[in-house]
């Protein structure tokens, strides 16, 4: 039986554009901490091998802190580590991959052609290739035949699976099936997904290790893969430190900004948001004509409570349609003109029409337009 730790897409040294300078530094520090934590877990839990399936680094300009962290974490392992460079960290662009500073237990694929590394003591051979630039327009497995080997054959690859037009080393599931791998460790698609079975091969993307944006919801992690004869089991181990959460809050109960502050305070307190949480909050519901949420205040309030926060107002003004229907003054007339759009199936159309009606009614009443 062998135990493999499958990770990738760490994107160390990500730009984190939406953050301020100090937040960026903290976010990169967190990424390094997640990587170091993973490697400690590998050392403490008797893994036989680590596979890193591309995009270990986000950029070719790797910082000295990150290089040091990676060298230190990988040097602390007794087991072999195989790295398959991806589109963000192509072999030719990352000096650490070729300048001899990585410890001896680390093997980095260095050719776009398929390569095979044998680990006789484990009875494992690992097949893979390297991105040499930020794209790879062919299927690396085309024409490749897995060398016959008395043991387990693995694939360690950065690839867009079953996307033949992709610029990112498009491999077809049928190619994987033909090659006779027991397990295909893949990187590139960050979304968390369940492993697939293609013929006799179990195929899995490791997913993102730590969330970097609102398109990576949930807790990131890595995969612990156990291979016992023909039996392959894959377990997700959570390592993520950062959560990006998109949520909505119905603020209909709040009649003014003071009440809204109270409602938001209560909402935050009632949810178990972790320390490093980024929140994208959309305010929804119906509000009185006299009340318009003060979004600057809402954003300031949220930014004090979260690592990062965005807020958007998608509320609709509360409209007494029955009263306006039978109103034959200018008020009712404005309503009737806007009615088709107020009843549109498109929520954005409804919002615009409701905003226009609100402004018109406040103007007709001679009230302040807020
Ligand atoms: Mn990636």
Image (cartoon, rainbow, N blue to C red):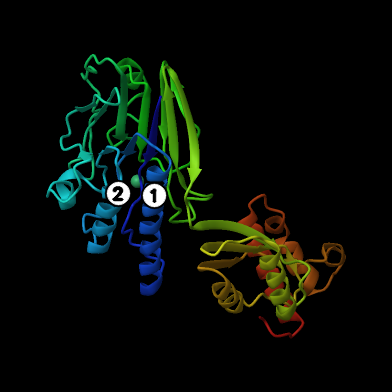
Kindly report the distance in space between the C-alpha atoms of the residues bearing marks 2 and 1. 8 Å
Crowd tier of the residue under label 1, counting other residues whose Cα lies within 10 Å: few below 14, some 14–19, many 20 or above: some
Some atom of ligand 1 lies within 8 Å of the CB belonging to the residue at label 2: no
Q: Quadrant of the C terminus?
A: bottom right
Q: Which mark is residue 76?
A: 2
Task: Judge whether 21 appears above or below 37 on screen.
Answer: below
Helix, strand or loop under label 2: loop
Residue 342 point in image, percent of width and height = 71, 58
- Residue, x 52% and y 57% (percent of image)? 244
Helix, strand or loop under label 1: helix
Left or right? Give the position of 31 relative to 287.
left
The image quadrant that residue 119 belongs to is top left
**75 and 129: which is toward the camera:** 75
Left or right? Give the position of 346 relative to 115.
right
Residue 337 point in image, percent of width and height = 71, 63
Q: Which mark is residue 53?
A: none
Residue 226 point in image, percent of width and height = 44, 29
- Residue, x 21% and y 20% (percent of image)? 144
- Residue, x 70% and y 55% (percent of image)? 340
> Quick check: marks 2 and 1 in contact, CB under 8 Å?
yes
The image quadrant that residue 123 belongs to is top left
Observer able to see residue 147: yes
Some atom of ligand 1 lies within 8 Å of the CB belonging to the residue at label 1: no
Q: Quadrant of the N terminus?
A: top left
Observer able to see residue 161: no
**127 and 353: which is toward the camera:** 127
Task: Judge whether 185 appears above or below 222 on screen.
Answer: above
Task: Judge whether 238 appears above or below 349 on screen.
Answer: above
Residue 179 point in image, percent of width and height = 30, 18
Sooner in the amino-acid sequence: mark 2 or mark 1? 1
Crowd tier of the residue under label 2, counting other residues whose Cα lies within 10 Å: few below 14, some 14–19, many 20 or above: some
Q: Which residue is mark 1?
A: 40
């Amino acid at each position: 039986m062998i135990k493999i730790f499958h990770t990738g897409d760490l994107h160390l040294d990500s730009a984190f554009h939406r953050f301020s300078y100090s937040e960026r530094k903290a976010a990169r520090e967190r990424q390094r901490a997640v990587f170091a934590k993973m490697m400690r877990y590998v050392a403490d839990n008797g893994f036989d091998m680590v596979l890193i399936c591309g995009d270990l680094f986000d950029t070719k300009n790797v910082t000295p802190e990150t290089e040091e962290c990676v060298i230190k974490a990988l040097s602390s392992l007794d087991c072999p580590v195989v790295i398959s460079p991806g589109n963000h960290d192509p072999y030719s662009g990352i000096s650490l991959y070729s300048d001899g500073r990585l410890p001896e237990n680390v093997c980095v694929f260095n050719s776009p052609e398929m390569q095979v590394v044998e680990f006789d003591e484990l009875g494992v051979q690992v097949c893979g290739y390297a991105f040499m630039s930020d794209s790879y327009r062919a299927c690396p497995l085309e024409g490749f035949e897995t060398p016959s080997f008395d043991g387990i054959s693995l694939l360690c690859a950065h690839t867009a699976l079953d996307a033949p037009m992709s610029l990112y080393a498009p491999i077809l599931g049928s190619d994987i099936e033909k090659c006779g791998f027991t397990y295909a460790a893949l990187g590139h698609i960050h979304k968390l997904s369940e492993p697939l079975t293609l013929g006799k091969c179990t195929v899995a993307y490791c997913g993102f290790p730590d969330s970097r944006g609102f398109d990576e919801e949930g807790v990131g992690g890595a995969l612990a893969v156990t291979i016992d004869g023909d039996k392959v089991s894959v377990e997700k181990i959570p390592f993520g430190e950062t959560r990006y959460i998109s949520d909505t809050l119905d603020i209909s109960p709040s009649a003014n900004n003071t009440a809204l502050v109270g409602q938001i305070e209560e909402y935050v307190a009632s949810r178990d948001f972790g320390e490093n949480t980024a929140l994208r909050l959309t305010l929804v519901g119906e509000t009185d004509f006299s009340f318009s949420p003060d979004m600057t205040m809402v954003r300031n309030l949220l930014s004090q409570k979260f690592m990062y926060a965005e807020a958007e107002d998608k509320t609709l003004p509360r409209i007494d349609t029955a009263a306006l229907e039978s109103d034959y003054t200018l008020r009712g007339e404005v309503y009737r003109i806007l009615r088709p759009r107020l009843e549109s199936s498109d929520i954005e159309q409804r919002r615009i029409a409701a905003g226009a009606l609100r402004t018109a009614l406040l103007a007709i009443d001679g009230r302040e337009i807020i």
